[in-house]
Image: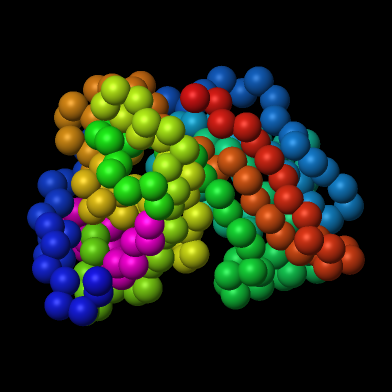
């Protein structure tokens, strides 16, 4: 699929990203899934930044909220602002190195749930389209078969509605906006995705319907394979 590909995102056809006023959800305390001496596993609410932005008005984020209760907590990965779900942090330098290497070497296994517009015809598939930043429309991303970095997403249909499909997604790489761009390229953008979906898909949901439901890692303490679950809220 990659060789000679000239799909709609092969060249930059993105419009500029929409302007938005950051309105983080109320701080009602951390949704803690698991905590021990090495790791803190949280469920991130939708529309909360993982880490603070450049503007003072973007200082409220999951990292800042976690550090209030766990001063040693360090970020090892990120979720898009609109994405909810599993978010793991390290509580000491050794665990931070251990988890960082797992993400770098693709030793983690992530499962996402997404609701997309339209009825996906096949029951499962693989999207292999390299990506890079759309420099003229940052922070948007785009498919580029010549200069893009490898981006692979495996997907499976969970259910079909009247005009929407629920998918289970297994990203094999961790590019910024990967799932959102890949599903848009599949022809079935995620509901509520103001960056990549058409207006009719954006207006069908008040939030981005993308949730990080499950994360499998090797525990930094003993190397045991463990998994953590944050049930999909939509």
* 130 is within the stretch colored magenta: yes
Residue 59 in sight in this render:
no
Foreground residue among 185 and 41 = 185
Residue 2 in sight in this render:
yes
* 191 is within the stretch colored magenta: no
Q: Position of residue 175 (x, y in %)?
A: 41, 62
Residue at the location (39% across, 27% down)? Answer: 207
Q: Is residue 121 left or right of residue 179?
A: left
Q: Quadrant of the N terminus?
A: bottom left
Foreground residue among 221 and 122 = 122
Foreground residue among 1 and 58 = 1
Q: Position of residue 129 (x, y in %)?
A: 30, 67
Residue at the location (25% across, 74% down)? Answer: 2
Residue at the location (13% across, 47% down)? Answer: 15
Callout count: 0
Residue at the location (68% across, 40% down)? Answer: 229
Colour convention:
rainbow
74 shown above or below 229: below
Q: Which residue range is magenta in the image?
A: 125-141
104 shown above or below 153: below
183 shown above or below 132: above
Q: Position of residue 140 (x, y in %)?
A: 27, 53
Quarter of the rendering containing residue 167: top left
Q: Position of residue 41 (x, y in %)?
A: 72, 44
Q: Is residue 73 left or right of residue 18?
A: right
């Amino acid at each position: 699929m990659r060789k000679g590909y000239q799909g709609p995102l092969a060249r930059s056809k993105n419009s500029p990203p929409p302007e938005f006023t950051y309105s983080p959800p109320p701080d009602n305390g951390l949704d803690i899934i698991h905590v021990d001496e090495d790791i803190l596993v949280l469920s991130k609410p939708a529309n909360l930044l993982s880490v603070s932005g450049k503007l003072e008005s973007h200082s409220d984020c999951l990292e800042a909220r976690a550090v209030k209760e766990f001063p040693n907590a360090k970020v090892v990965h990120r979720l898009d602002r609109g994405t909810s779900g599993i978010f793991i942090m390290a509580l000491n330098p050794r665990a931070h190195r251990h988890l960082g290497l797992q993400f770098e070497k693709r030793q983690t296994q992530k499962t996402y749930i997404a609701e997309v517009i339209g009825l996906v015809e096949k029951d499962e598939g693989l999207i292999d389209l390299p990506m890079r930043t759309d420099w003229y429309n940052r922070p948007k991303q785009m498919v580029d078969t010549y200069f893009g970095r490898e981006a692979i997403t495996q997907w499976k249909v969970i259910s079909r509605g009247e005009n929407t499909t629920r998918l289970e997604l297994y990203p094999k790489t961790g590019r910024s906006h990967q799932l959102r761009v890949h599903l848009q390229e599949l022809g079935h953008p995620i509901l509520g995705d103001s960056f990549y979906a058409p207006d009719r898909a954006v207006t069908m949901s008040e939030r981005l319907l993308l949730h990080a439901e499950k994360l499998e890692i090797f525990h930094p303490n003993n190397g045991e394979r463990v998994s953590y679950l944050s049930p999909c809220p939509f």
